[in-house]
Image (spheres, rainbow, N blue to C red):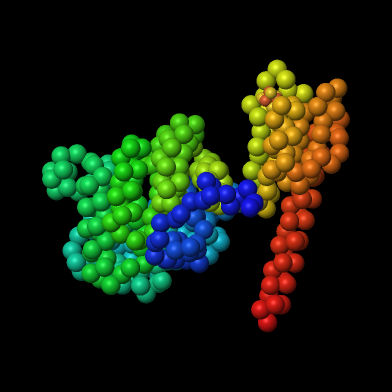
């Protein structure tokens, strides 16, 4: 049995309906997607396009853009054709922005049908979504629960959040609209996790998971990893947004790192490195820091170990595509496919490892292309 499929590594994903955000499937058996949100002014069309492109390079599958006013929803007409990822328009209260966004190319509307007023308005938004093949995301947030639910439950709690979600769901279902996902976010990890767990039981719509307003890069990453880690590990979550008060590109990187840690998605190089100590035979921290930057362009899934000495180096290397272990007298050991391959002197460690990883990535891609061609030929 390969290490990747050992029983203790298996996550049984909750069965959810499949929807689409543009060309990207969400739910069902589709891969868990990673999303982020622009923080440029949407009316600054070029800046927004540039930021979306940066997010695409980082691997974002879906990007959300705020549409607080008519100029912003109008800007989507110019933004959407210039980018590859599907765009979710973030609408809060004004139903007209939702209609405009659907008309202007949004692939999904983040809108709460219970917040936009009369049945007629909801019907208009749903019609626009149907006409333009637009999905929706119901976004329940502990910080903005409906007043009647707060009065009923006394405070934001999982029950209130699920009831809010079910109320919004019912409105869309009453309009024969089922092409939506749901989020149920809170900045409190306990509340967010409990709400998602309850919502996962209460419906089979795909779930967009996140701990909202999680904080800055480090604290937000930790908080999100605990909350989303709990959910993902138990099979809950079809699309992920890590909310950080940081460059949105960091949100995408953290999202992928979370999924990589749980073996739920593989993209790019997974570096396994030791914290270093007095036994290290080269500067592990500096080497890993530079390697992470130099290998950021690799999208092929692969594992690289960078370990300071023989205490853990050879063992870790057996489970990696490329391994590097510090050795005595400035002579280090390189492993390829888990086996010792050659030795390397102190000079040019990073350049050497980068070129090994790039070659390995090319080899993996070529093998994959050959296997796909063979499978296609067999299917003919
Ligand atoms: S692998 Fe070696 S250098 Fe790295 S932390 Fe362990 S003992 Fe220290």
Residue at (55% x, 43% y) in the render: 261
Residue 324, percent from left and from top: 76, 35
From the viewer's perspective, tell me whether residue 178 is left or right of residue 248: left
**Quadrant location of ligand 1?**
top right
160 shown above or below 15: above
372 shown above or below 346: below
Nearer-the-camera pick, 4 or 165: 4
From the viewer's perspective, tell me whether residue 223 is left or right of residue 247: left
Residue 118, percent from left and from top: 18, 63
309 shown above or below 123: above
Residue 336, percent from left and from top: 79, 44
Residue at (86% x, 35% y) in the render: 343
The residue positioned farthest toward the top in the image shown? 278
Where residue 273 sits, quadrant-wise, is: top right
The residue positioned farthest toward the bottom in the image shown? 380
From the viewer's perspective, tell me whether residue 196 is left or right of residue 300: left
Nearer-the-camera pick, 212 or 115: 212
Residue 117, percent from left and from top: 20, 60
Which quarter of the rendered picture does the C terminus lie within? bottom right
The residue positioned farthest toward the front in the image shown? 1
Residue at (34% x, 45% y) in the render: 185
Residue 245 appearing in the image: no
Where residue 275 sits, quadrant-wise, is: top right
Residue 317 appearing in the image: yes
Nearer-the-camera pick, 226 or 103: 226
Q: How many marks?
A: 0
Residue at (37% x, 42% y) in the render: 212
Where residue 189 sits, quadrant-wise, is: top left
């Amino acid at each position: 049995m390969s290490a990747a499929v050992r029983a203790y590594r298996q996550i049984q994903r909750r069965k959810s309906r499949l929807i689409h955000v543009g060309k990207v499937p969400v739910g069902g058996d589709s891969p868990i997607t990673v999303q982020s949100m622009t923080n440029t002014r949407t009316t600054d069309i070029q800046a927004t396009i540039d930021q979306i492109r940066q997010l695409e390079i980082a691997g974002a599958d879906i990007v959300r853009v705020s549409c607080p006013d008519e100029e912003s929803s109008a800007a989507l007409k110019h933004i959407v054709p210039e980018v590859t990822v599907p765009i979710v328009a973030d609408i809060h209260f004004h139903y007209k922005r939702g209609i405009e966004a659907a008309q202007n190319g949004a692939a999904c509307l983040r809108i709460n049908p219970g917040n936009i007023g009369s049945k007629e308005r909801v019907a208009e938004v749903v019609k626009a979504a149907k006409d333009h093949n637009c999905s929706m995301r119901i976004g329940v947030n502990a910080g903005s629960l409906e007043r009647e639910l707060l009065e009923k439950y006394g405070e934001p709690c999982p029950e209130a959040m699920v009831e809010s979600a079910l109320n919004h769901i019912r409105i869309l279902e009453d309009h024969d609209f089922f092409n939506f996902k749901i989020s149920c976010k809170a900045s409190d990890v306990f509340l967010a996790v409990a709400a998602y767990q309850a919502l996962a039981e209460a419906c089979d719509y795909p779930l967009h998971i996140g701990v909202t307003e999680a904080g800055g890069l480090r604290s937000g990453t930790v908080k999100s990893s605990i909350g989303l880690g709990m959910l993902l590990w138990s099979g809950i979550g079809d699309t992920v947004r890590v909310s950080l008060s940081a460059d949105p590109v960091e949100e995408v990187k953290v999202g992928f790192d979370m999924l990589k840690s749980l073996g739920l998605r593989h993209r790019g190089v997974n570096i396994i490195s030791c914290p270093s100590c007095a036994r290290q035979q080269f500067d592990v921290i500096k080497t890993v820091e530079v390697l992470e930057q130099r290998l950021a362009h690799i999208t092929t899934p692969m594992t690289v170990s960078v370990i300071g000495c023989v205490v853990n180096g050879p063992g870790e290397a057996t489970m990696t595509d490329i391994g590097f272990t510090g050795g005595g007298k400035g002579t280090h050991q390189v492993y390829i496919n888990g086996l010792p391959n050659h030795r390397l002197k102190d000079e040019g460690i990073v350049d050497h490892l980068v070129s090994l990883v790039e070659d390995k990535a090319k080899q993996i891609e070529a093998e994959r292309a050959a296997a796909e061609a063979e499978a296609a030929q067999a299917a003919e």
